[in-house]
Amino acid sequence: EGEFANKTAHVDILNNPDIKTMLEECTYLKPPSDEEAQHLAEQFVDPPEMDQDDIPDFVIAIDGSNYEVSIDEKLPSTKFGFIKVGVILIRLDEFGALKVGKFVDPFKVAALKKKNTALTFFIPSANIKLHGQDNVRDSFRRLLDQQLYNERTRFNADDPRTSLRSTLFMLASLRPGTMGTGDDEKLKIHKCPNCGEGPITVEDVSEQQYCPHCRKEVYPSDCLRLWEEVNDFQSNQTAITRLMMILEHILPAHYIRYFLKESPLLLTNIAFFVDGPLAVFGNAAWLHRSLMIFLENAKRKLSRFNAKPIMMIGLQKSGQVVDYINYVDRFLPKNKIYCIDDEFRYKYMLGGRDPAGKTFGFETYYGQDFIYKTGSGKTFNLLIPYPFSSKDMDGIDFNEEKTKIGNYENLPRALALISHLESDLYKNAVVPIALAHRYTAISFEPGGKVLDLFSKKSLGRENNG
C-alpha cells in the first residue's frame, strides 16, 4: 500500500534494440496478405447436401467456467477454487416457439432461464488443506475423487456405477497399450503420487485404496495426473482450469454411456455441443485416445439398429484458427466449407512452424477442424470427431483420410443444425452455447427423470404422428 510504479518505466523496454532484434527473428502468426486469403478461399468447397428435417430434436450444450478466490482479502495467498460446468438441454421445438415474428418472447425466455443449474466442483488451492491431509496436493486429490463419486454426478443416486467416476473408469480401461485394463471396473495409475512406484491398479469401489508399495492413499482420479500441477503455496489456477476442461469432455461420454445402456436409440436424436476444440491437453491428454475408441464403439453399437452415429460438435470462439478467420473472413465464400489440412495449418495459421509428430494434434485431438461459412455470412470453426478409433490403424493414411469430407457421416446433419441455430447475439455466435444460456435452457442434471424427459417427448411425437 502506498507503493506506486514509475509511469515511464516502459520506455526503456520499448527502446531496447535487443528486444526489437529478437522480435524480428521470431516466427509468429502475421496478418495474411490478400493473396494468401484468396488462396484459402479457393480451398473451400460446397458442403454436403443438408436436410433441415433430419436435425436432432435435442441439443446438449456443455460449457464450463472456473474461479480461484482468496478466502479473506487480508489473506490473498490463501485460495480456494470453484468450477461450474453447465450441462444444458435445448429442445428445438421450444426454441422455435420462443419467436414471435422477428422477436423473442422475453417472458418465455425468463421462465426457462429460471430452471438453469450446473454441476459445481470446489477445490482447495494455495495454503488450504483438508483435515487429516498433510498438504494441498493430497487435499486436492481426495476432494476431487470424492466429488467425481458423489451422488450429484450419478444418474441413479443409489447406484455408484452411474457416477462420473465410473465413467472415468470406463474411459481409462479403453487406453491403448499396457495402461489399458479392458475391464471398466479397473484402471491403472501410472505411478503413486507419494512414492513414485507404478503402475498401480485400482478398482471401482467405495473403500479407500492404498499403494501396495508405500501403503499411502491412492485415488482412481489420480490417473488424470492433475496432482502433478498442484502447489502448496502458490495459485493452482492451471490445475483448476485443466480440471474444468477435462470435465467438459468427460461429461458427454458420461451421458452417452448411460443412454447406450438404458435407451441407445435416443442418442440418434441428440446433438452434443462442446465449447472449444475436441481435444484434451496436459497430463490427461491420454483421454483423447480413449474418447476416440469410445465414440467408435458407440457408433458400431448403434449401427446394429441401423441408427445414425452420435452427433458431437466442438465450437471454438477463440484460438489460432479463429484469429486467422477474422483476418480473411471477407474473402471466404458463403455456403462453403473447408476441412483444414496440416499443410495449410502449419504454413499459414501456425506461423510457418515445422509439423510436430505424425499429424497435427496427434497427442491431444480427437476431432477434425472445419471452417464453415453459412449462407447468411456467419463463419464457424467447428470440429467433428474423427471417424476412426485410432490414428495408427494399419492400411490407413490418417493424415490424408482425416481431411476427406465424405468420411464424416454426421457432417451434413451438423451443418444443418448450425445453420438452424444461427444467432445474432454475438458476431458469428457460438450458437448452442449462447442459446443454452439465453434462450431455451432447461436443467439437465443427472437424475432418474432424464429418460422420462426424452421418452415422453419421443412418444408424444410418435403418437401425434
Image (cartoon, helix red, strand yellow):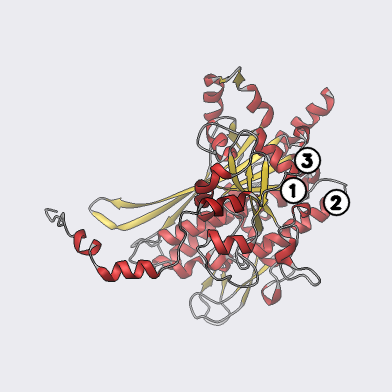
290 and 218: which is toward the camera? 290
What kind of residue is marked 2? Ser
Cα distance in 3D space between marks 2 and 1:
10 Å
Q: Which mark is residue 303?
A: 2
Residue 81 horizontal/vertical position (percent): 41, 54
Q: Residues within 10 Å of mark 2 (few under 14, many from 20)?
A: few
Pointers 3 and 2 in contact (C-beta within 8 Å): no
Residue at the (41%, 68%) spot, across then down: 26
| Amino acid type indicated by mark 1 | Ile
Which residue is nearer to you in this view: 366 or 402? 402
The residue wearing badge 1 is 310
- Which mark sits nearer the N-terminus, 2 or 1? 2
- Residues at discs 2 and 1 in contact (Cβ within 8 Å): no
Residue 231 as seen in the image, left or right of residue 34: left
Residue 13 sits in quarter = bottom left
Which residue in the protein does label 3 denote? 49
Q: Is residue 151 visible?
A: no
Local SS, label 3? loop
Q: Earlier in the sequence, mark 3 or mark 1?
A: 3
Count residues near mark 1 (Cα–Cα under 10 Å), then give few for <14, some for 14-19, many for 20+. Answer: many
